[in-house]
Amino acid sequence: MSKAVCTFILSLIAFSAFSQEKRPVIAFTSDTQEPMWVEKIMLKSNHNQQATKMIFKDVLSLHPSGFFILGDVVSVGYRVSKWTTIDEYLKQFSHDSIPVYATLGNHEVLFRPKRGVKNFQTRFPMYKASGYTEIIDSIAVILLNSNFNKMTAAEILAQDNWYNKMIKNLDKDDSVKFIIVGCHHSPYTNSKIVKPSMAARQNFLPAFINSKKCVLFLSGHSHNFEHFVENGKHFLVIGGGGGLHQPLYAKEVSHDLAANYKPAFHYLVIRRFNDSLQVVSRRLKTDFSGFDNGVAFTVRSN
């Protein structure tokens, strides 16, 4: 039996067990923005808006305890018209009492950042410039702003101080078993279109790596699924929410454990099983007939 077949079978078994357990679900996606015409000059479109619609519908069917979007919710944040479709999706989630959380991507602060942030915060009033935390089923999710080029030195310092203090407090909190950190820009990626964020590495990784409860660092910006392990910690790029799929370097800049798993569109589902987290990537089939399981793995805190 080939290695690829074994991996698929193991993923199928994991997802089957995952689906049968009646435990709280947490879902994550990133880069749900409608492609801009200028992007289509370099990259190929592929029914992107339909893919985003299907992702929201599939997540809705799981009725998660929380749905997190890691930036680039829309293509141009300051234009109210660009929020129309997303507003309809958010209305559906609200109707089913499913909270949706988000953090800023670069498209939210494109051209007119203040107006973009205002439109963003209207939809996600829980957002705070210094970062914020949501706790679901003993899993703390910290969302941060990685648009460092749009932030003042004082804003960056305020976020750093809040973040480092929050990590220390959560590590001491017995009611919290796991910490997931999320932002838009990826500290690690092999994308040919966007670079790894050195600022995210410098500002966010030390506290993450030193924390005994931090187990996953999630990001987008690179429109791919990528999986890296650094210092024993897992880093996932989940930018498959509907943006134009990006090419990757044939020779990896960073070692991607999911080098053979590159769906055009996908999102992440997480459940807690006592002292571990089951992480599953849900991918949209290439014929748009529905979703199936892609990769699945388990993480544990130290």
Image: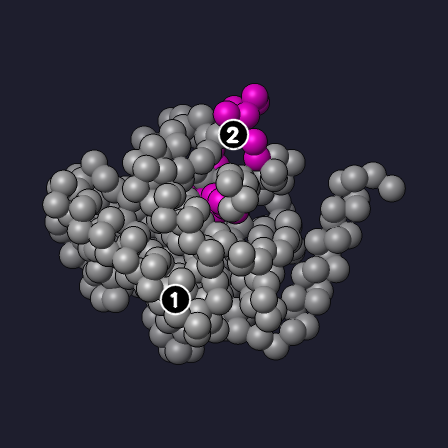
Q: Residues within 10 Å of mark 2 (few under 14, many from 20)?
A: some
Mark 1–mark 2 distance (CA, rounded to whole Å): 33 Å
Report the residue at 47% width, 56% height from top.
212
Query: Magenta residues?
Result: 234-256
Q: Position of residue 136 (x, y in %)?
A: 44, 71
Foreground residue, 62 or 79?
A: 62
The kind of secondary structure element at disc 2 is loop
Residue mark closest to the camera, 1 vs 2: 1
Question: Label 1, on which residue?
Answer: 172
Residue 193 placement, left or right of 82: right
Say if residue 31 shows up in the picture: no
Q: Position of residue 286 (x, y in %)?
A: 62, 45
Say if residue 272 shows up in the picture: yes
User: What amino acid type is highlighted by mark number 2?
Assistant: Ser
- What label sits on residue 133 in the rendered view? none
Report the residue at 71% width, 65% height from top.
16
Q: Position of residue 121 (x, y in %)?
A: 21, 60
Q: Is residue 272 above or below residue 151?
A: below
Question: Label 2, on which residue?
Answer: 254
Residue 207 placement, left or right of 63: left
Q: Position of residue 234 (x, y in %)?
A: 52, 46
